[in-house]
């Protein structure tokens, strides 16, 4: 039974890696195939410019994979890791809905609503997972420290950068943190529920 749980954790972890890779590739490919300009355009603009199909498809696929990652982890995680996993799954739903309700849909209200949804649940997942990583001690505290750095840089640069620059830096910093968190998750097997034999 413990091996089955560990196998589920590895599958969930790799789904998370794949989700992030799909999202990053979609952003880069969409930006390269449009007149998107760093600092002038927000990431959301990729969903309505040339290359929008690549971006929106990437968000939908990446969001579904992130939902599966969060749900897979939540099925085995406990405590704060479990809460973080549920938040990751909810963020995956938000990513899908960002593509469904792009900026051209009506007034863009639904897009902004799901942008806040995804950002909020990603941030909460980072916070609660980082608290547990810190509690676990050892090298895991480095990953928790990276989350603190991401939040501090995000707060400090909010006033110094354009909204579009700030959003882009913050999104990529959060994606890097999730890659580190997932790598720790895959490498440790720490989050597997204790199963009585």
Image (tube, rainbow, N blue to C red):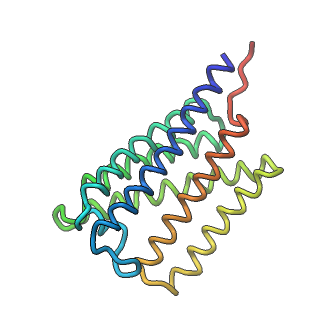
- Measuring 64% from the left and 42% from the top, which residue is drawn there? 81
**Residue at 40% across, 57% down:** 117
In the rendered view, would you say 39 is above or below 62? Answer: below
Q: Residue 145 or 169: which is nearer the viewer? A: 169
Return the residue found at the far top. Answer: 197
Q: Is 163 above or below relative to 50?
A: below
Question: Which residue is at the front of the view, 100 or 27?
Answer: 27
Q: Give the camera-side residue of 57 and 197.
A: 57
* Quarter occupied by residue 38: bottom left
Number of numbered labels in the structure image: 0
In which quadrant of the rendered image does the C terminus lie? Answer: top right
Asked if residue 130 lies left or right of residue 43, the reply is: right
Give the quarter of the figure containing the N terminus: top right
Specify whether 45 is left or right of 87. left
Q: Position of residue 86 (x, y in %)?
A: 52, 42
Q: Nearer the viewer, residue 59 or 118?
A: 59
The percent position of residue 10, horizontal first and vertical second, equals 60, 32
């Amino acid at each position: 039974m413990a091996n089955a749980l560990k196998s589920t954790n590895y599958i969930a972890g790799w789904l998370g890696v794949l989700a992030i890779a799909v999202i990053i590739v979609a952003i880069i490919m969409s930006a390269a195939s449009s007149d998107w300009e760093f600092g002038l355009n927000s990431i959301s603009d990729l969903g309505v410019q040339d290359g929008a199909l690549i971006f929106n498809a990437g968000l939908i696929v990446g969001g579904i994979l992130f939902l599966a990652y969060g749900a897979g982890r939540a099925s085995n995680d406990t405590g704060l890791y479990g809460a973080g996993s549920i938040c990751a799954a909810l963020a995956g739903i938000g990513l899908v809905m960002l593509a469904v309700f792009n900026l051209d849909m009506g007034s863009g209200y639904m897009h902004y609503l799901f942008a806040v949804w995804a950002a909020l649940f990603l941030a909460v997942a980072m916070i609660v997972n980082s608290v547990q990583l810190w509690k676990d001690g050892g090298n895991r505290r480095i990953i928790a420290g990276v989350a603190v750095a991401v939040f501090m840089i995000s707060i400090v640069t909010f006033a110094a950068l354009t909204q579009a620059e700030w959003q882009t830096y913050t999104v990529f910093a959060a994606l890097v943190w999730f890659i580190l968190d997932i790598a720790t998750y895959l490498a440790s097997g720490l989050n597997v529920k204790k199963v009585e034999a």
